[in-house]
Image (spheres, helix red, strand yellow):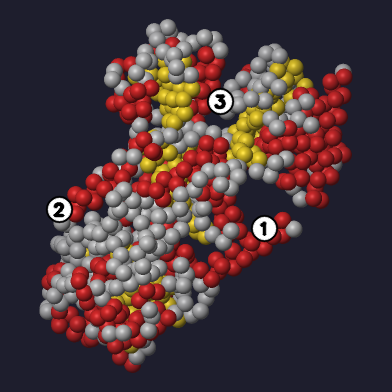
Amino acid sequence: MKKNLKFIQGNEACVEGALYAGLDFFAGYPITPSTEIAEMLSIRLPQMGGKFLQMEDEIASMCAIIGASLTGHKVMTATSGPGFSLKQEALGYAIMTEIPCVIVNVQRGGPSTGNPTHVSQGDVNQSRWGTHGDHAIIVLTASNHPDVFAITVEAFNMAETYRTPVILLFDEVIGHMRERLVIPQKGEIPLVQRLKTEVKRDVDYHPYLPREDGRLPMSDFGGIHRYNVTGLFHDMWGFPTDNPQVVHGLLRHLVDKINNNVHQIARWKEYFLEDAATILISYGSSARSSLHLVKERRARGEQLGLIELQTLWPFPYGMIRQKCENARTIVVVEMNMGQITHEVKLAVHDPGKVFLANRIDGELITPDDIKKIIRLIQGKGV
Amino acid sequence: MPIKDYIRERFFPHLWCSGCGHGIVLNALLRAIEALGINKSNIVMVSGIGCSSRISGYVDFHTMHTLHGRALSFATGIKMSRPELTLIVPMGDGDALAIGGNHFIHTARRNIDMTAIIMNNRTYGMTGGQYSPLSGFGTLATTAPYSNIDHDFDVVELAKAAGASFVARSTTYHVQQLTDILKAAIEHKGFSAVEVLSQCPEYFGRKNKMGTPADMLEHYKENTTTIGSKKKQENPNLLERGIFVQKQIPEYCSEYDKIIEKAKKAVEGKTE
Amino acid sequence: MEKCRIIFSGSGGQGIITAAVILAEAAVLYEDMMAVQSQAYGPQARGGVSRSDVIISDSTIDFPKVIQPNVLICLTQAAYNAYSPLIRPGGLLLSDEKFVNTDRKADARQIRLPMYATVMETIKKPVVFNICVLGALISLTKLVKPESIMNVLETRIPQELLKMNNEALDLGIKMGTTCFRS
């Protein structure tokens, strides 16, 4: 048996990816179906000298990781549904103060306490707009364990690159399912380390003065520079201001640093698109059902293709528009009431050819479910 | 180091109303830090939201102005990752005990080494004088126009019950005692809760006809006494000031270091 | 190997989820195959009808759940009643004599073995019942080698319990082999 060959749950694959990326501080609160992440990190982090904290609630966990990140650590929290709602306030704080962190949401059925042990993809829009105020956000997902591992590493890299919270939006099926994972060797996936300021001790340091490329070098809080951090609109020193010019400039910066880099942030996989008359678009566990169907129907000569999204936000409108140009029908397969379907309709020239194939009863949508819906769309009946 | 070297002069004048007690708390805090001789680069101040929380902007430490009620949670993350730093968390009464009440009791329970200063002015000043969990039954506020029917917390009793290893109370009238208490609180290894009665003449004082700021300070003088004093025995209604709890119990960061040792040993045992 | 889709069903506490994980892990870690394992979560895992799905294959597995099993294991009557209609024609339905009456007509090979009774008779520990079931399963299906199961067990249970588990596995293998011949 190879030492780096594992047969583990998706939640564990996420933990392995996070540790590979350099995670050394985690705070969380138990909630199904994400709890395994906390349990496993409570074992693994102290073994490496890292810190694991179980806080009094999800709010406190989110705040604790932000505090720890500011001092120079790679941090993560993990939660689900109701806990994700509680994290929204501090998520906005991390956006405003540009503090890198990774938030895992293993989705379960909602709203409210919902359907804790069953799958759903109902938090797609919450992950985009859950915290108040205008902002940009990076939301990533994956459908199998090697990808869960890789996208988790990517989440840490993007959090450091853009100095922003990154949300990993998994689902119950992916989180709990056990599957094969070969852990990459050290160095196989490049890691992004925090961009540190070069400003020397006792020299005036401007914690919120971005470089020309938009990146913001950091000084570890508690280190050689004393500065202020606030969730209020702030100037280049990090001091509260309501100066309209500064307020405008900061909000533009927060949005532009992500939305101007959609091409860098967009991750997706494509299958059989060349001649596809019908293109499925899916993500997370429903992408597995979609791929199963696509392979099965291709074997029978049907012109079916699949785009599997790994970056959900910022939504890759341009990519979708281009890839779907020649498709007669686009079917978005997701386990909600059409949250990504809505974006796909915005992306393509003819929204009339975009349909939703969904399931919202807590069960994983099956290849057969999708097949029947496609036949209905095509007017062939089930 | 002169006191003025601990402040960020360019961010003055401060936003507190004239007569507000919070400046006195700032003064006492800086004197305590000066007396302890702590390097200002080793101090982190984390605050939440409210009049009191603005204190973090004025001091030349590492300062983090966070969310309403959540300062202790941010501070926990910082302290756990940099245990060698001195953490000071100034909070308002609504900040610490309404929206942040849960974080307050749990941070106390963990006994993580930091000093929470609850600047109790019995109102939400920044939003214009609404009643707080410390306003008290029968007081008036902009959201209690007919009289407040909420009973208040006793911060000291609450902190004791929550397991804080250092609990004290003073007022903005008793500046010398306040400085001494803050010194002891900062030096204490563990969670320190210090309640400071700090007057809000603008809202609480005006609504409840407490008179001028000087009258309010006078009120603190008249209505409080040192712990276990003769005056207290004669008049049980007086509020006690001083250090109520000061005990050494295992501190969170130190205990976590032991967990790391245990975990590392467990791995070594396995690989052998 | 063609895809094999297995449902383990029984009641919480019988160890069926553990058995499913061990089987799939053995296939992946020691036989270089692909496998996915999933299970019903929540109160079912602690009582009531409990279920775990395993797919083993030599190529990528996309849809991870089992809709029509080739192999169905039922360790309670309730599980049998609930899942026996799902089995693929020509599949294998393995059940235990003590817990299940195979009174239904299924288009499948129904094998009912005295696994629980044998374990209680010879080892006297109900905790290894699931390992005996695994033994019977691998001898009937040749999904993985017994050594691979033991390899997994070595990483999961204390040294002193290995012998007992090995015995249980052998008991199951024997029962499976015998019924093959008959």
Separation of marks 3 and 1 at Cα, in angstroms: 37 Å
Q: Do dots 2 and 3 share one subunit?
A: no
Quickly name the residue at label 1.
B267
Separation of marks 2 and 3 at Cα, in angstroms: 53 Å
Q: Residue at x 19, y 49 (%)?
A: A248
Q: In which quarter of the image is the N terminus of chain A?
A: top right
Instruction: Report which quarter residue B136 is drawn in.
Output: bottom left
Q: Can residue B154 be seen in this view?
A: no
Does residue C126 appear to the left or right of B32 in the view shown? right
Residue C175 in percent (x, y) is at 84, 28
Up the image or down, A181 lies above or below A165; here it is: above
Up the image or down, C118 lies above or below A82; here it is: above
Q: Do dots 1 and 2 share one subunit?
A: no
Q: Residue A244 carries which label?
A: 2
Q: Residue at x 43, y 34 (%)?
A: A267
Q: Which residue is drawn at 64% across and 41% down?
A: A6
Residue B6 in percent (x, y) is at 29, 78
In this rendering, which labeled residue sits more in front, label 3 or label 1? 1
Mark 2 secondary-structure assignment: helix
Amino acid carrying label 3: it is: Phe
Does residue A83 appear to the left or right of A37 in the view shown? left
Separation of marks 1 and 2 at Cα, in angstroms: 56 Å
Quickly name the residue at label 3.
C63
**Crowd rating for badge 1 (residues with CA inside 10 Å; few <14, some 14–19, many 20+):** few
Amino acid carrying label 1: it is: Val
**Crowd rating for badge 2 (residues with CA inside 10 Å; few <14, some 14–19, many 20+):** few
> Could you tell me if the residues under marks 3 and 1 are in contact, i.e. CB atoms within 8 Å?
no
Q: Which chain carries label 1?
A: B
In this rendering, which labeled residue sits more in front, label 1 or label 2? 2
User: Between A119 and B9, which is closer to the camera in this rendering?
Assistant: B9
Q: Which mark is residue C129?
A: none
Instruction: Report which quarter residue C112 is drawn in.
Output: top right
